[in-house]
Image (tube, rainbow, N blue to C red):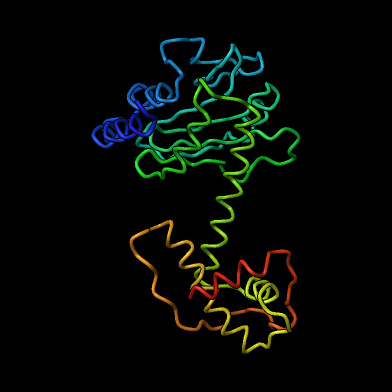
Amino acid sequence: MDLADRLSMLRARADGQRAALDCQKTTETALVLPFFDALGYDPFDVRAVEPEASVEGKDETVDYALKRDGRPVMLVECTAATKPLEAPGAPALLRHAEAMDVPLVLFTNGIRFQFYAVDEGEAEPPDGPALDFDLLDHSSNEVDVLRRLARPVFEADAVGAAMRAWTRSRQVRAYLTQQRDAPDAPLVQFVATQICDENVSGDELDRLRSVVQNVLDELLGATEDDNERPAPRAESPVPPGGADADTQRRTGVFEKDIVKRALNDL
């Protein structure tokens, strides 16, 4: 059975039982262990799923260590499905994982699965999970990322690269989504430097802002709803507090023709 199908079955189970999963152990039994199993980690084989695993040979333990070829590849901490998912111990557990050469840390309440990538040598812990997977509301792209974590194909270097790429993708999408609502002067000026051969006046930049907004609507809207094309926006005013256009012009390295074609499509 495909991973997407197994996740769909698990989602239906979560919908029906969530209110009753008010303690950690019932959540683990109903949702967390089946999730491990969907990724190829047999919850009945301690060589794949080790409960109460020791951390760095100390008295400290984590709820589970997922293992491949005799080595832990993921440290897991759980809580009840009815509780909000928080990770107050993430920095400490990430340090333990780094010392143990474990590439991933997972915090879960059986509904949300927050995967943190362990980057060797990073001075500060990440400001958020590399992947925040919601069992009840997820995309096919997120399922594709999960496939890389499956036990039969797990490779630490490949997983680390995939998680870093997914983190950057999430950050870029968040930035572009914010810009779609109100493109700021630096972005508009950057686009102007790519598509215009001469300096652009402040009035022209103001008109270009609405064009940039429309293009972002189309590019981002296409991934959110392929059946509905966003309506063009009217010209947008300069965002409050925006700096003077002529003092914030930027240069860039994008191919001008790519942006030109996107604008010509309007």
Up the image or down, 173 lies above or below 258; here it is: above
On-image quarter of the N terminus: top left
Q: Residue at x 42, y 43 (%)?
A: 140
Left or right: 229 as drawn, with respect to 156: left
Up the image or down, 4 lies above or below 45; here it is: below
Q: Quadrant of residue 94?
A: top right
Up the image or down, 143 lies above or below 76; here it is: below
Q: Residue at x 74, y 72 (%)?
A: 250
Q: Residue at x 64, y 37 (%)?
A: 161
Where is residue 258 drawn, in percent x and y? 61, 66
Q: Residue at x 54, y 83 (%)?
A: 237
Up the image or down, 166 lies above or below 184; here it is: above
Looking at the rendered structure, the number of numbered marks drawn on it comes to 0
Where is residue 148 drawn, in percent x and y? 53, 31
Where is residue 104 drawn, in percent x and y? 59, 30
Where is residue 196 drawn, in percent x and y? 68, 79
Q: Quadrant of residue 65?
A: top right
Q: Quadrant of residue 16?
A: top left
Q: Which residue appears farthest toward the left when viewing the image?
A: 16
